[in-house]
Amino acid sequence: MARPDDPRDQAHDDAVEGDGASTSDARADGESGLPMMASVAPDAKAAAEVAKRSVARALPLFRIAIAVRAALAAMGAWLVANQLGPELADYAYAAPLGAFVATGTTIFTVARTALTQAVGMTVGALVGMGLLAVEWPGFVKIGLIAGVGVLMQGIPRFGQAATVVPVVAVLVIIFGGVDAEGYAIGYVGQFVVGMALGVLVNAVALPPLYDRETRQRIHETVADLAERTGVLAETLRGDWPPEREDWASWGPELRDRVAALDGQVDEARDARRFNLRMLWHRHDLDVDEQAVSALRSVVQRMDDVLDALAATAWDRPIAITLERDERQLAADAVEALGAHLQAWHDREGMDAASTASQDAIDALYRRSIEHDEPESGVATVVFALRAMRERVDWAAAAENAEHA
């Protein structure tokens, strides 16, 4: 569409042509402006979507929920701490700090953190009071505190919670004064009260279990593997060596994804401990662990297949010969494996998909042994495909038993 005339020129034309022309031109100007406004709207909408996704990544719902629980625990700790008598009320500021420490995604992790922090603070207070009782130079006391703190960090059950040992010990020495015992009891006691309230708030708030999300991620990974095997089969049927090379380096990405699933299963297991929701929300995490174990094996064997096929295409890391008919049979076997994975994802047709996968692998094997000296690379592919098929059947059987 042509750009509208300059308003000053249009006004001059209106004055010459009269009111009718003026009305017509005004209508034309209005119509010509609509596409410009419409072109701006999609850009603004896209920018809004990008901003929304950025905010969602920076402030996910689970993080907001943790922040709300921490705020409630800190406020409750402050109110309770100021009601514990004049001697302890002087240290009421420590209670909200303890409530803040006792925050996390699961009740188990919150309780474990609170317990180890309480033990670490108690040890730190005892070390500080013990050093106040001896007439040693200040630099010697500081060195001893640092040494005890580092030694405690080496105890697996304490870990990072041992870092509070030197902090509390130094605070007792600096601020304890003539009443070091009263300061230690007040500060540590209020801190522990705050952590106890933090654990209580987290328990009452019923944090999520994360088990459904974990299983969804597992299914997404299975679907992704099925899609990748389809791409690989299509590549094997095309020109050889292929122009597309990215499939040869899928291994590290897939291993990282399975490692992330391992962490999610562990988090889901921790989320169920001491969580009242598990009383009415049944979920067998052992099935998820078996699925992740199967995926780990599939990814490991898939890496072997990718290396062998890449060697037939580009002679690296070693040269392997794969004749055209063998490549077609390999494509059939890989495609059948993808259908097998998809059946696992869909939870239907497993028996037929498993049989088809076995037949395709056997066809590749029979063709490979027709040579006087079968290629080791083909043998690697056959073994890897068989191992993947068995692991998929094993994981699917466990999942079917859960739903039986």
Image: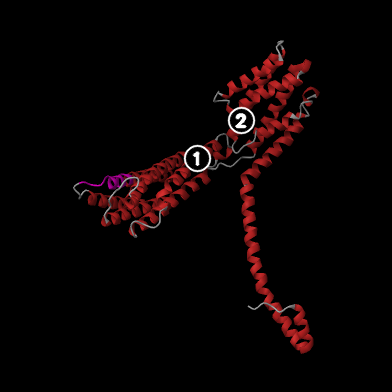
Residue type for callout 1? Val
Query: Image quadrant of residue 323?
Result: bottom left
Residue 394 position, x and y percent, is 37, 43
Residue 15 lies, with reference to residue 398, above or below; the image says: below
Q: Is residue 102 left or right of residue 335?
A: right
Residues packed near mark 2 inside 10 Å, few (<14), some (14 to 19) or many (20 plus): many
Front residue of this view, candidates 399 and 257? 257
Helix, strand or loop for the magenta stretch, by majority: helix
* Magenta span includes 186: no
User: Dot 1, how many residues are within 10 Å of its Cα: few (below 14), some (14-19), or many (20+)?
Assistant: many
Residue closest to the far right: 86
Of the residues under marks 2 and 1, which one precedes in the sequence?
2
Q: Is residue 309 left or right of residue 97?
A: left
Q: Which label is found at residue 265?
A: 1
In the image, 99 versus 245, the foreground residue is 245
Q: What residue type is labelled 2?
A: Thr
Q: Give the range drawn in magenta.
A: 373-384
Residue at mark 2 to residue at mark 1: CA–CA distance? 20 Å
Element on which disc 2 rests: helix
Residue 380: within the magenta? Answer: yes
Query: Which residue is farthest top?
Result: 135
Please, is residue 9 above or below residue 373 in the view? below
Seen in the picture, residue 56 relative to 127 is either above or below; the reply is below
**Image: 58 above or below 76:** below
Q: In this view, does 361 lie to the left or right of 370?
A: right
Q: At 61% from the left edge and 33% from the top edge, which residue is drawn?
A: 110
Report if residue 404 is visible in the image.
Answer: no
Q: Which residue is identified by label 2?
A: 113
